[in-house]
Image: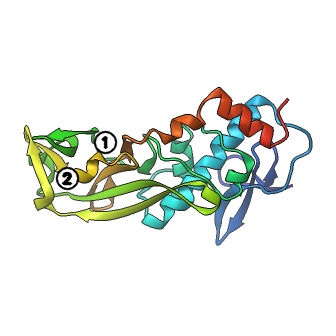
Amino acid sequence: MKMKQPKIGVEIMGRIPSLGVTKYVRNGMVITRTSTSESRGKSSLKQFIQQQRMRHSIALWKGLSRSSPLFTEGKDAYHSFLSLANKLPVVYLPKNKWEVEGSLLMPGIPVSDGILRPMQQTLGEVDGTPALITDEKASNSLSRSAFLLYTAEQGTGHMECPEVSFRVRVVQQDEFTLVDGRLALVDSSFADETKGWALVRVQGKSRSPQGIVTRCKIYEQYTTEEALQEAAKSYGGIK
């Protein structure tokens, strides 16, 4: 295994069996991906849980990275995302679904970080119509900010594997509805239980740190003790 000496600390390059990942350098950037080869022996429960967490974070990033996520803090966008995604619930997928990079929609998937104040966002209703409601005052933002809306959708990919797709678009000012002087987006699409959203405020190179809000609960069936045991069984068990 090769060792790389960065400016601060030591970073291990190569395959890391305990995490089930491989790290390598491409175009001057450190890339982390899931390992496909088998490690010797069985993982401990703690190792297996961390492997599952890392695999899911990497799968989410591969989908999100196509939609230009807004990360400015840390070493680079990829590692900033991994650091934030490490706080998400652990989901347990069997080996055959990790091999096709399965991913699950859940609350909190990060799409941006930055120095602006994060906007609190909730899914609710405005005059009976589904809405994405924020705590952002229109008087503070509309005149000097731009807004990007990220949409995540739970679908099914190769081999009937769960897969999250992402897209992003610019929100025009006339799309907003004011609720007690605060910004909201009102549309029937916000009732969709297979989708999630995150509204990001942008000022120049600064942006607000935001994560997905969603009504989707499909991921919950992959967080149970039964799902953990089934996933572990597909890898030959754990210590």
Place of residue 193 in the rendered image (x, y in percent of width and height, measured from the top left): 37, 45
Place of residue 126 in the rendered image (x, y in percent of width and height, measured from the top left): 13, 41
Q: How is the image coloured?
A: rainbow
Q: Earlier in the sequence, mark 2 or mark 1?
A: 1
| Residue 103 seen in the current view | yes
Q: Is residue 214 above or below residue 72?
A: above
Nearest the viewer among 6 and 88 is 88
* Left or right of 133 in this view: 7: right
Place of residue 142 in the rendered image (x, y in percent of width and height, measured from the top left): 13, 55
Nearest the viewer among 40 and 162 is 162
- Would you name the residue on which mark 2 appears? 187
Q: Farthest residue toward the right?
A: 40
Place of residue 237 in the rendered image (x, y in percent of width and height, measured from the top left): 83, 35
* Left or right of 222 in this view: 137: left
> Helix, strand or loop at disc 2?
loop
The disc label shown at residue 150, or none: none
Q: Residue visible at 61% across and 54% down?
A: 161
| Residue 89 seen in the current view | no
> Helix, strand or loop at disc 1?
loop
Q: Identify the image quadrant of the C terminus.
A: top right
Q: Is residue 196 above or below residue 92?
A: below
* Left or right of 215 in this view: 46: right
The disc label shown at residue 118, or none: 1
Q: Residue visible at 91% across and 40% down?
A: 41
